[in-house]
């Protein structure tokens, strides 16, 4: 039963990775967007789980490397995301956050998510 679940998750992961590739190739998503990297990383994680369960070691290592690359790229994109959020806060006349901690503490005290309006409108 575990192998069947792992294979199903592997197919879902393959579909996610292919969807990410299609979205970038058709220019519906930018290759440096968090959306692309998260979709790709989720697919790689599910594929890695299926490879681990079926003992497909070369594919497991390949998917873990892709996952590590995606994590690094999202980490590098955090500066761009924070800059976009700061621009949105200034536009609304609020103090701009300087770190992720500022963003989440502001969201919890303001009663809503600050990302709703700022990430929706891309410059």
Image (spheres, helix red, strand yellow):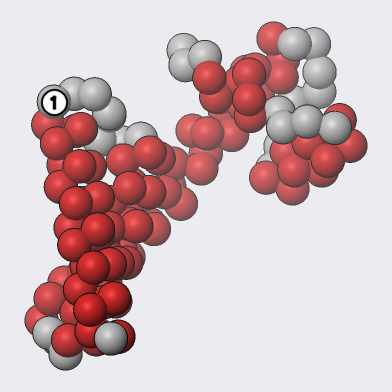
Q: Position of residue 77 (x, y in %)?
A: 44, 41
Q: Name the residue nearer the viewer: 3 or 32.
A: 3
Residue 49 is left or right of residue 59, and the answer is: right
Extreme residue toward the bottom, this view: 55
Q: Which residue is mark 1?
A: 26
Q: How many marks?
A: 1
Extreme residue toward the right, this view: 109
Residue 96 is left or right of residue 13, and the answer is: right
Q: Is residue 93 visible?
A: yes
Residue 7 is left or right of residue 25, and the answer is: right
Q: Position of residue 10 (x, y in %)?
A: 22, 67
- Quadrant of residue 27 in the image? top left
Q: Is residue 3 above or below residue 75?
A: below
Q: Residue at x 22, y 42 (%)?
A: 20
Judging from the image, what secondary structure is the residue with disc 1 in?
loop
- Quadrant of residue 84 in the image? top right
Q: Is residue 64 above or below residue 110?
A: below
Q: Residue at x 64, y 29 (%)?
A: 115
Q: Name the residue nearer the viewer: 49 or 91.
A: 49
Q: Position of residue 33 (x, y in %)?
A: 35, 35
Q: Is residue 114 above or below residue 75?
A: above
Q: Name the residue nearer the viewer: 108 or 100.
A: 108
Q: Quadrant of the N terminus?
A: bottom left
Q: Residue at x 31, y 40 (%)?
A: 36
Q: Is residue 99 above or below residue 63?
A: above
Q: Is residue 60 visible?
A: no
- Dot 1 surroundings within 10 Å: few (below 14), some, or many (20 or more)? few
Q: Residue at x 12, y 84 (%)?
A: 56
- Quadrant of residue 65 in the image? bottom left
Extreme residue toward the front, this view: 1
């Amino acid at each position: 039963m575990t192998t069947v679940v792992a294979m199903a998750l592997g197919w879902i992961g393959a579909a996610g990775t292919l969807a990410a590739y299609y979205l970038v190739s058709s220019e519906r998503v930018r290759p440096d967007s968090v959306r692309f990297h998260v979709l790709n990383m989720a697919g790689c994680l599910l594929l890695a789980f299926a490879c681990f369960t079926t003992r497909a070691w070369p594919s497991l290592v390949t998917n873990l490397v892709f996952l590590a690359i995606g994590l690094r790229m999202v980490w590098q994109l955090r500066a761009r995301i924070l800059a976009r959020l700061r621009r949105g806060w200034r536009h609304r006349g609020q103090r701009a956050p300087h770190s992720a901690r500022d963003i989440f503490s502001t969201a919890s005290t303001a009663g809503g998510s600050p990302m709703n309006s700022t990430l929706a409108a891309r410059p």
